[in-house]
Image (spheres, helix red, strand yellow):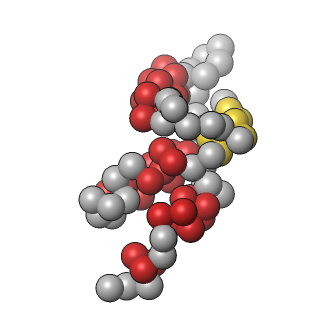
Amino acid sequence: MDRINGLSDEIICHILSFLPTKESALTSVLSKRWRNLFALTPNLHLVDDDLEVGGCGQTLIDFVDRVLAVSSNLPIREFSIKC
């Protein structure tokens, strides 16, 4: 077992909470255990890299919908959107 997989889910979620949500979600491909850990983080930091004219792009809106669907029953401590 590698060192990072030896950490508890709570510690991994704490570490993931410092990443933008999209990057945190990308960790879900690391293993089955990591699949939904990003959704357990109390911070949502959303960044839209693909801006459309006039505001946030549809890709960001779709991503926010998916993230909120996965973590719908959990409290959110921080929420930010950069677009």
67 up-or-down from 34: above or below: above
- State the residue lying farthest toward the left: 32
- State the residue lying farthest toward the top: 54
Picture mark count:
0
22 up-or-down from 82: above or below: below
Q: Quadrant of residue 75?
A: top right
Q: Position of residue 38 (x, y in %)?
A: 48, 50
Q: Does residue 26 appear in this view? A: no
Along the horizontal axis of the image, is 36 left or right of 52? Answer: left
| Quadrant, the C terminus | top right
Q: Quadrant of residue 1?
A: bottom left
Q: Position of residue 69 (x, y in %)?
A: 43, 28
Q: Position of residue 34 (x, y in %)?
A: 37, 59
Residue drawn 39% across the image and 49% down it: 36
Q: Quadrant of residue 21?
A: top right
User: 26 or 32: which is nearer to us?
Assistant: 32
Along the horizontal axis of the image, is 83 left or right of 74? Answer: right
Residue drawn 62% across the image and 46% down it: 42
Q: Does residue 9 appear in this view? A: yes
Residue drawn 61% across the image and 22% down it: 56
User: 82 or 52: which is nearer to us?
Assistant: 82
Along the horizontal axis of the image, is 23 left or right of 75? Answer: left
Q: Position of residue 50 (x, y in %)?
A: 53, 32
